Image (tube, rainbow, N blue to C red):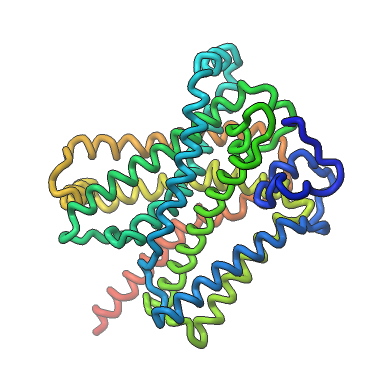
Amino acid sequence: MCKETYSNGYPALFSTPPYNFFYVEVMLWRSDYNFRKLNTPLLYCIVFVWSVLWILLVIERFTYGRLVWNNMYLWLVAIPWIWMLLLAGMAIANLSNINTSLGRVFRMGAKESLIIFSDAIECALYIHSASTGTELIHGKGLNHYASGHIDPRLNSENVWQSGLMLVLTALHVGGASFCAQSNGRNRSVYNMYESNLWILPMYSKCTLVGNYSHLLSTLLFGGLMFSYMTVAFVLLKTALHTIFEYRVKLVFVEQAVVGGLIVTCMALSLLFATSNGLALLESVEAVMSGLATPYVCLLELVALLYVYRGHDFISDMNVATEENLCSTRINTQWHIIPFIALIVIILKMIVLNHNELPERYMYIALTPLAAIVLSVPLRACHNAYVFLHSTMRRRNN
């Protein structure tokens, strides 16, 4: 594939980087599903990433005396934009062959076309979740927009900030989706038994110029890794602030909690660095990105539009934009989005029903999805119990 073969071990310098591990492992697909053999370069990379995240927390603790929820360095804003420009540039380069791509789609059967469009949507979800990290970088780096909070004194900044993030996310998602859809037409890089993880090597395929382009692949994979490192860092801080009620000073028990979270996450990551890791990761990726992510999006949209009440949400949007947007148009758009999320779920269920993944690993991958599905009724039961218990206590008093 791409005029490169990997017969023994991993390439030397200037070749596929460790975080392009999936590209190599798909070619070296092993049928002995076990957790014994570790991928040493990927193991070092995983330990290094989690160590960096822990060091950043410690540095922030000594710099500010505590962890600051909306603290983010301004220079981090440039990294996602560089990545987006490269990815969008590769997508634009493929526009010259759009007629060939569309013609091939119409010549294929319904099943093949469904898989391509479904994978393109799934790829868009990947980049959209990475763009969540980008949004957090912008919002906290520029100190204008805090997650879940609107400052009336900064309405004008919120308007251009939201518009900037909309453009960035659209370019991310659009570029990745087009690369994913046009990937099927390029038979020279589509001639192997590919797994669902082709979405990650897809960034390499979109940068091909004759042979495999290591520089562009490294830049694109580096941007993707950087975005997800940022997401992990912000989510880790969010978990700590939630546990300790926004007063995190990394002392005594807090250090133990931080260490436990990092070690647990790193241990789970190491499962995917084994010889069996690719089959397990492919199964988890197929379920989590194809079903769990749009399912969570659907739940959030339903809660936002029908539990929180749509007119209150529109009112808050108008406050944030200084009444500069058409409320009717926003209302219509937000009521269409849940149906799009539902379509994504149905498409992925059809595709996953015909996959060739090891059955037992698909069952393992369904565990987190089952937890997500059960979390909603369990949380509802907990809230109902707390409400009824407090009501009965007030009556008794």
Q: Is residue 145 left or right of residue 57?
A: left
- Give the percent coordinates (x, y) of residue 347: 52, 32
- Give the percent coordinates (x, y) of residue 265: 61, 65
Residue at 52% from the left image edge and 32% from the top image edge: 90
- Give the percent coordinates (x, y) of residue 198: 64, 37
Q: Is residue 358 left or right of residue 176?
A: right
Q: Which of 63 and 326 is in front in this view?
A: 63
The quadrant of the picture occupied by the N terminus is top right
Q: Residue 46 appears in which quarter of the rendering? A: bottom right
- Residue sitting at the far left: 323
Q: Residue 327 appears in which quarter of the rendering? A: top left
Q: Is residue 374 left or right of residue 325?
A: right
Vertical placement of residue 13 versus 340, above or below: below
Residue at 38% from the left image edge and 76% from the top image edge: 245
Q: Which of 331 and 251 is in front in this view?
A: 251
Residue at 32% from the left image edge and 59% from the top image edge: 142
Q: Can residue 361 be seen in this view?
A: no
Vertical placement of residue 395 versus 233, above or below: below
Q: Nearer the viewer, residue 169 or 364?
A: 169
Residue at 20% from the left image edge and 61% from the top image edge: 151
The quadrant of the picture occupied by the C terminus is bottom left
- Residue sitting at the far bottom: 252
Q: Residue 100 appears in which quarter of the rendering? A: top right
